[in-house]
Amino acid sequence: DGHNLENAFLSQVLRWASGTQLPIGGKLVRFGTNQTHFRFGQTIHVRARILKANLLPESHLHFNVQARIIHDTQNARRVGRLQSAPMIAAPGAPGFYDGVLTGLEPGTYSITLKGNGVAAKLANDPTTVNHSEIIRIKAAKNLEMLDPSADPRALRRLASAGHGLMLQGPDFPVLAACLPPQKHILKSVQRAGLFTNPKNADTRMLHWLFLLIFVLLATCEWIIRKFKGLI
């Protein structure tokens, strides 16, 4: 019916495989982040899988993921502050929800789920091992590496400071016209020999020279042998 069933099957297999890697929770609720250590400025992706008591996927839930800072070496006043983001149902994957946390300051955070009875499921499920996940956000040593995209205003300031001009990509011919012509001397090294490129003029000349020397040597030997009466 126009549906690519192979892609649908493989996508479901990938979702199932990624869902089995969710480290926090129990039989009914499991969740986790894409990693446990982040640099300041990185996006934190959270995935959760919610099941009913009969172990069927539970959809259409509205709950949040919360990040509570539990340790901050830079500012102790921030300890205990909360930041939350909504968990959105993953399309094509019943029972799976995705959330994104951004703007978290460097420190250690406790990640939990709240709302719509999800926290109660975690608390009441005897198979639940951990109710929260601990992640750490480190201060970035090089802020320039957080966003590799160019900043046009910063580039314009740099060009102005150097008494230069900043142009957009389509205006490159204007910049090229301002550049002074440069003379470049290209040197190519070629090796002449009897067994190099046969189409090379030097190689052909060596072949003829070798043939001439061979004929001269053979002629000299014949003359000497004739003079000595050896033939």
Image (tube, rainbow, N blue to C red):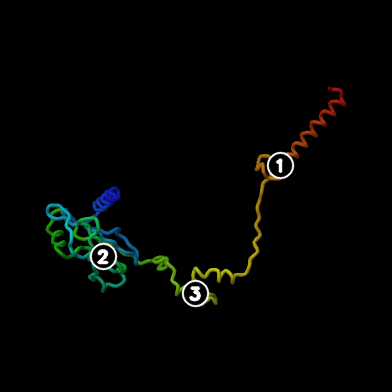
On screen, residue 5 versus residue 222, left or right, reads left
Task: State the image coordinates of residue 210 (x, y, percent, origin top left).
Answer: 74, 38
Q: Residue at x 77, y 36 (%)?
A: 213
- 10 Å neighbourhood of mark 2: few (<14), some, or many (≥20)? many
On screen, residue 213 versus residue 27, left or right, reads right
User: Callout 3, which amino acid?
Assistant: Leu
Q: Which mark is residue 109?
A: 2
Query: In front here: 66 or 166?
Result: 166
Q: Which mark is residue 158?
A: 3
Q: Is residue 114 above or below residue 20?
A: below
- Secondary-structure class at tag 1: helix
Looking at the image, tell me whether mark 3 or mark 1 is earlier in sequence order. 3
Question: How far is mark 2 from mark 1, CA to CA?
Answer: 77 Å
Question: How far is mark 2 from mark 3, CA to CA?
Answer: 38 Å
For the C terminus, the image quarter is top right
Mark 2 and mark 3 residues within 8 Å of each other at the beta carbon: no
Task: State the image coordinates of residue 205 (x, y, percent, origin top left).
Answer: 73, 42
Task: State the image coordinates of residue 92 (x, y, percent, origin top left).
Answer: 24, 56
Question: How far is mark 3 from mark 1, CA to CA?
Answer: 58 Å
Residue to which mark 1 is pinned: 204
User: Callout 1, which amino acid?
Assistant: Arg
Task: Give residue 229's quadrant in the image.
Answer: top right
Task: Single out the mark in the foreground, 2 or 3.
Answer: 3
Task: Give residue 37's quadrant in the image.
Answer: bottom left
Q: Residue at x 21, y 63 (%)?
A: 112
